[in-house]
Amino acid sequence: MIRIDNLTKIFETPNGPVTAADHINMEVPEGEICVLLGPSGCGKTTTLKMINRIIPSTSGKIFINGEDTTGMNTVELRRNIGYVIQQIGLFPNMTIEENIAIVPKLLGWDANRYKARAKELLELVALDPSIFLKRYPRELSGGQQQRIGVARALAADPPVMLMDEPFGAIDPINREVIQDEFLKMQQELRKTIMFVSHDIDEAVKMADRIAIFRGGRLVQYDTPDDLLAHPVDDFVESFVGDDRALKRLRLVQVSQVMEPVTTVSPGDSLKVALERIEQQGYSHAILMVNERNQPIGYVSRSVAQTTNGLCGEHYFGLKADTRPEDDLRKVASLMFNHDTTWLPCTDEHGVLVGQVTQRGITHYLGATYHRDAPVSLAQTLQQISA
Ligand SMILES: Nc1ncnc2c1ncn2[C@@H]1O[C@H](COP(=O)(O)OP(=O)(O)OP(=O)(O)O)[C@@H](O)[C@H]1O
Ligand SMILES: [Mg+2]
């Protein structure tokens, strides 16, 4: 756990004092990722560097696992804090293995142990040890160097990690990949992490909580969903972006908005299908399932109204389906691609467990937007296509 209490930094400069951090109060619970987010110069790096005392604070206190760090010696403090610096900062004259082993060597690990650890960490950040251990930083791409930066910070397995834009030099596609890898890693490692970013999408994806900074002040500290649903002021609102409804979709799973669904079987008559469509108030169609309750298609209202016969003779194939753990961003995208307002949801055996509808999604988002008009999925879909 990291607790920051009235932390302040005033730099004295030839042009007068600069307040880089202004009475910051916040707490990062154990095992969580807190993302510090804000425009350039708002004090993110300064706040981070006060925690491992690379920058001495002007006033205020920092507690790690309940212990006031003021009295701790610097070496002891930094041993427990992994640090990924903004400019990567690998030592150019050392191999990757030596770079990763810096802290373990300081801690007196023997060669076998730190070499094994370097190998293990390269695998963790998805770089082949047989290729990279003996290379020098200049022989790596920017993104690969950043991975080494992360591996180096993890070397001595510190409980607390400070990461300053750790994926900033990685192209968008590989960035998503390394973010996913990192989150998977974090599920096991459960480090307490302060992570600096100026990318709202990265923050929403990575954070348990987001801290928005502006001009040295902490202006909002909330879960990603609360931040997107209730920005405290115009600055935060414009910072999170006017597509914030769309960003929220990524945070909600199908299971949270899933509804029960009424179906027909291939042996049911189209008359039955029409009755059920009307009873349920379905606008266009009804889902058809096989004897194992697996969706196989749908019967449209217009066909049921104008045709006689059995559902199994007059159905359309399924366009797509979803899983309970899918996020709504994926669902919205599927709905948009297939021009549909609902999708069935199935378990890992393809068995129907419910449906997700545009109306259900809009209702869910609207119910948590106390202050705003509900955002319609249609608006959101327009943003996807824009
Ligand atoms: N050593 C220093 N001396 C004087 N002013 C400094 C010093 N370091 C930082 N500052 C100022 O403090 C403010 C906060 O800087 P900081 O590096 O914390 O910003 P940041 O939020 O990390 O920005 P970025 O996103 O660009 O990395 C800025 O106005 C910066 O100019
Ligand atoms: Mg910075």
Image: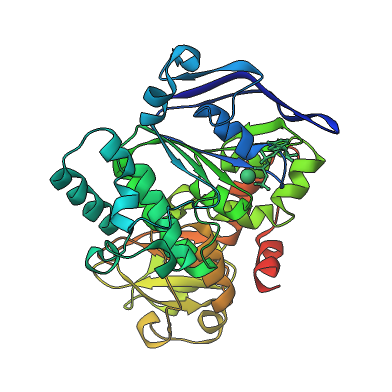
Q: Is residue 176 above or below residue 238?
A: below
Image coordinates for residue 185, horizontal then vertical, percent: 33, 49
Residue occupying image coordinates x 28% and y 52%? 121
Q: What color scheme is it? A: rainbow
| Residue 132 horizontal/vertical position (percent) | 30, 65
For the view shown, which residue lies furthest in the right direction? 15
Q: Nearer the viewer, residue 313 or 340?
A: 340
Q: How many marks?
A: 0
**Quarter of the rendering occupied by the C terminus:** bottom right
Q: Tell me which image quadrant ligand 1 sits in.
A: top right
Whole-percent x, y for residue 38 in the image: 68, 44
Q: Quadrant of residue 19?
A: top right
From the viewer's side, name the closer residue of 210 and 178. 178
Looking at the image, residue 208 sits to the left or right of residue 341; the answer is left
Which residue is at the front of the view, 242 or 207?
A: 207
Q: Would you say residue 230 is visible in this rendering? A: yes
- Eyeballing the image, is 240 above or below 335? above
Residue 140 visible, this angle: no
> Residue lying farthest left?
112
* Residue 113 position by quadrant: top left
**Depth check: 369 or 62 in front?**
62
Residue in view at x 67 percent, y 73 percent: 385
For the N terminus, which image quadrant?
A: top left
Direction from residue 386 to residue 201 in the image, left or right: left
Is residue 334 shown above or below 108?
Answer: below
Viewed as shown, does residue 70 lie left or right of 200?
left
User: What residue sits 51% from the left and 80% below the top?
Assistant: 304
